[in-house]
Amino acid sequence: MLIADKLVFIEFRNTGASHVEKLLQKIFGGEVDNKHKAPGEDVLSSGRVVLGSVRDPWGWYLSLWSAGCAKQGDLYQRLTSDKAWVKIGEKLEANAKARTDQAPADQVKRVVLPDDLSAHRATSFWYADPDNVEAFREWLRVVCSLQTRRAVDPSMAKSPIGKIGGLMTYRYFLLYVRGAGQMPVTIGTQEGLRAFEASNAFVHHVVRHDSLTEDLVMALERSNISLSDEHRKMIYDTKAAGRPSRIERFYDESSMELVARREKFIIERFGYQRPHV
């Protein structure tokens, strides 16, 4: 998170946030503090403009996996730890009978998980080769499954957000929406999520990764923060890292649909379209 005199920028990992943060610091100064966390009430009540960033969920998950292949990120640390998988096997076995009793429509939506859910599987297969399409798709099924969300993020497993949305939606709410960590359990629908965000979001502008420079300039102008010609040129001339290469190769229809279902809130909130495969 960057805190400058006029603005605050909250860094959302894998959305081009590092690029925006560096640009804003060059232009406005400020200090980077508590990266990847929401600001405290002292900052929110200071009158500063609060900016954030987002990207299409399909690109976000591929970027998140690629970071793990480079042994980076908190999700990589969790999934490659034996501790993350304690009791997961027992819980899945306990749910097996309930799975057979479900209606056909529910069975269609259930993610088929691999037989081996372990830290060894994570290190030896999921994160072993950044070019392995099948490894990515299996990893994605695990990360997007309701059954394994405790291993993916224990806090998400306790939140009603984890039942309605995926990891990206959960992180979005924690970063940009006041009270998301204590969201009422009575919120159980997409409509409920939208209403909660509308009432509690404290971020003023969200910059989209796919139109980063245009969104950033527009956000600053709408916030009455003036830019010199030099600074404007700096923003337009400095490009962020693009969408992970070969995204269409890594996804198939099934994995596309899985992300579309779990990240419905983000997709509808920012008008993202499913990439073609």
Image: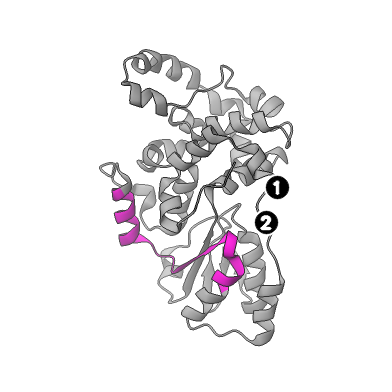
Report the residue marked by disc 1: 245
The residues colored magenta run: 191-216
Say which amino acid is labelled 1.
Ser
Pointers 1 and 2 in contact (C-beta within 8 Å): yes
Residue 242 shows which numbered tag?
Answer: 2
As helix, strand or loop, the secondary structure at mark 1 comes to: loop
State the image quarter where residue 103 is shown: top left
Q: Is residue 162 magenta?
A: no
Say which amino acid is labelled 2.
Gly
Is residue 168 visible in the rendered image? The answer is yes
Quadrant holding the C terminus: top right
Left or right: 46 with respect to 274? left
Where 105 sits versus 96, above or below? below
Left or right: 208 with respect to 202? right
Q: Residue furthest front?
A: 276
Chief secondary structure of the magenta span? helix
